[in-house]
Structures are given as structure tokens and as C-alpha cells.
Image (cartoon, rainbow, N blue to C red):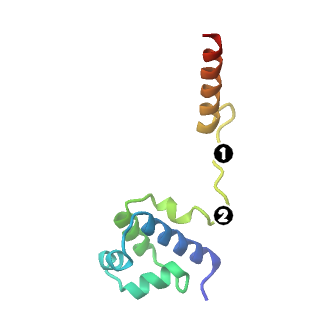
């Protein structure tokens, strides 16, 4: 039985592959594995190897971290004290733009 982390990684692989509109057979062929093995990895019936993750990273043209996004729960980057997130910065700029429009 595969653990929950391996299942989540498989789901992420499938999600990324489907976003890129790549058929499972094409990706499996590029990896040098059978389509049934890739199907088993994506469905969580078996875990994958680091070598296969490296191949998938290259084939799917995505950062390695994308395979692990959901492993530790929701991703919440921690910024150094005094720094703003992009969302906060965008909100502040939008607010300033609105104040400028009110003046005109």
C-alpha cells in the first residue's frame, strides 16, 4: 500500500501532465517506462523514484517543487519581517491608484 504523500505526488504529476495536454502514453514513452507504470504512479497505486521525478520535471517543464506542493499542507511562504507579499503590494498599489482617480 502506498502512503498518502506518494499518492499526493502522483495526483500532482497527473494534474501537471493534464494541464499541459500531454497524453499519458507520450509522457510514459519519453520517460522510458510503460504507460501502466505511469498510470499506477499517478493513481497512487505505487510510488515513483527520484530518477523518474527528474525525468518528469524535464518532460513536463515544471519546477521539481511543483510535485510536492500539497505534501505539508497548504503552502504559505514566510517573508522576512518588514517585507510585503506580492498580493499585499498589489493591493496597496490598487488603493493608491484609486486615491489618485478620486483627486482628478
Q: Give how far across and how far down residue 41 sits, in percent.
A: 49, 81
Task: Examine the image and state in which quarter residue 63 appears.
Answer: bottom left
Picture layout, residue 7 above or below residue 96: below
Farthest top residue in view: 104
Picture layout, residue 87 above or below residue 77: above
Front position in the image: 104 or 26:
104
Task: Examine the image and state in which quarter residue 7 appears.
Answer: bottom right
Relative to residue 101, is residue 48 drawn left or right? left
Task: Look at 66% across and 45% down and name the residue there.
Answer: 78
User: From the image, which quarter does the N terminus lie in?
Assistant: bottom right
Task: Look at 38% across and 67% down and name the residue there.
Answer: 21
Rate crowding at label 1 as few (under 14), some (14 to 19) or many (20 or more) other CA atoms within 10 Å.
few
Of callouts 2 and 1, the N-terminal one? 2
Relative to residue 80, is residue 9 drawn left or right? left
User: From the image, which quarter does the C terminus lie in?
Assistant: top right
Q: Give how far across and how far down residue 59 sits, in percent.
A: 34, 66
What label does residue 9 carry, if any? none
Q: Give how far across and how far down residue 92 sits, in percent.
A: 64, 27
Return the residue at label 2.
72
Front position in the image: 88 or 57:
88
Task: Look at 45% across and 73% down and name the residue there.
Answer: 50
Relative to residue 40, is residue 88 drawn left or right? right
Relative to residue 97, is residue 61 drawn left or right? left
Return the residue at label 1.
78
Q: Which SS class for mark 2?
A: loop
Q: Which SS class for mark 1?
A: loop
Q: CA gap, disc 2 to disc 1?
A: 14 Å
Q: Give how far across and how far down residue 90 sits, in percent.
A: 59, 32
Task: Look at 58% across and 61% down and name the residue there.
Answer: 69
Front position in the image: 17 or 71:
17
Rate crowding at label 2 as few (under 14), some (14 to 19) or many (20 or more) other CA atoms within 10 Å.
few
Number of dots carrying numbers: 2
Amino acid at each position: 500500500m502506498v502512503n498518502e504523500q506518494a499518492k499526493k505526488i502522483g495526483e500532482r504529476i497527473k494534474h501537471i501532465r493534464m494541464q499541459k495536454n500531454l497524453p499519458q502514453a507520450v509522457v510514459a514513452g519519453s520517460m522510458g517506462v510503460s504507460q501502466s507504470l505511469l498510470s499506477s504512479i499517478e493513481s497512487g497505486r505505487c510510488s515513483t523514484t527520484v530518477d523518474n521525478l527528474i525525468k518528469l520535471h524535464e518532460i513536463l517543464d515544471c519546477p521539481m517543487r511543483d510535485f510536492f506542493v500539497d505534501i505539508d499542507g497548504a503552502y504559505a511562504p514566510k517573508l522576512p519581517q518588514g517585507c510585503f507579499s506580492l498580493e499585499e503590494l498589489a493591493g496597496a498599489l490598487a488603493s493608491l491608484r484609486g486615491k489618485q482617480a478620486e483627486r482628478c
